[in-house]
C-alpha cells in the first residue's frame, strides 16, 4: 500500500515537472534572441526575477 502512495506521488511530481519543462521551453522560444532578459522578468512587481537563486 505504501509503495502505491509513493508511485502516485511520483507520477504527480513527474507530471508537474513535465509541465514546468514545457512552459520553460515555450518561454525560451519567445526569447530566443535574449534569454538573459527572460531571467530578469517578473510576473508581479514585488517578486524576484526568474533568474534569482535563493
Image (cartoon, rainbow, N blue to C red):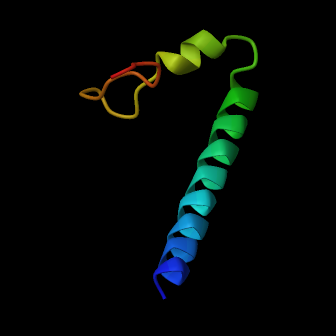
Vertical order, 30 against 3 (above or below): above
Q: Quadrant of residue 28?
A: top right
Using the image as rendered, state which of residue 49 and residue 54 is in the foreground.
54
Using the image as rendered, state which of residue 12 and residue 38 is in the foreground.
12
Residue plotted at (71% across, 37% down)? 25
Residue plotted at (74% across, 12% down)? 33
Using the image as rendered, state which of residue 7 and residue 44 is in the foreground.
7
Outermost residue toward the left in this view = 46
Residue plotted at (65% across, 33% down)? 27
Outermost residue toward the front in this view = 2
Vertical order, 44 against 40 (above or below): below
Please state the horizontal and vertical placement of residue 36, each as a whole percent of the image: 59, 11
Q: Quadrant of residue 10?
A: bottom right
| Left-right relation of 8 to 49 | right
Can you say which quadrant of the picture contains the C terminus? Answer: top left
Please state the horizontal and vertical placement of residue 41, each as a whole percent of the image: 46, 22
| Left-right relation of 5 to 35 | left
Residue plotted at (55% across, 76% down)? 8
Vertical order, 46 against 16 (above or below): above
Amino acid at each position: 500500500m505504501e509503495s502505491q502512495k509513493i508511485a502516485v506521488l511520483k507520477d504527480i511530481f513527474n507530471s508537474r515537472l513535465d509541465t514546468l519543462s514545457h512552459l520553460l521551453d515555450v518561454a525560451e522560444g519567445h526569447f530566443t534572441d535574449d534569454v538573459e532578459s527572460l531571467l530578469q522578468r517578473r510576473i508581479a512587481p514585488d517578486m524576484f526575477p526568474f533568474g534569482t537563486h535563493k
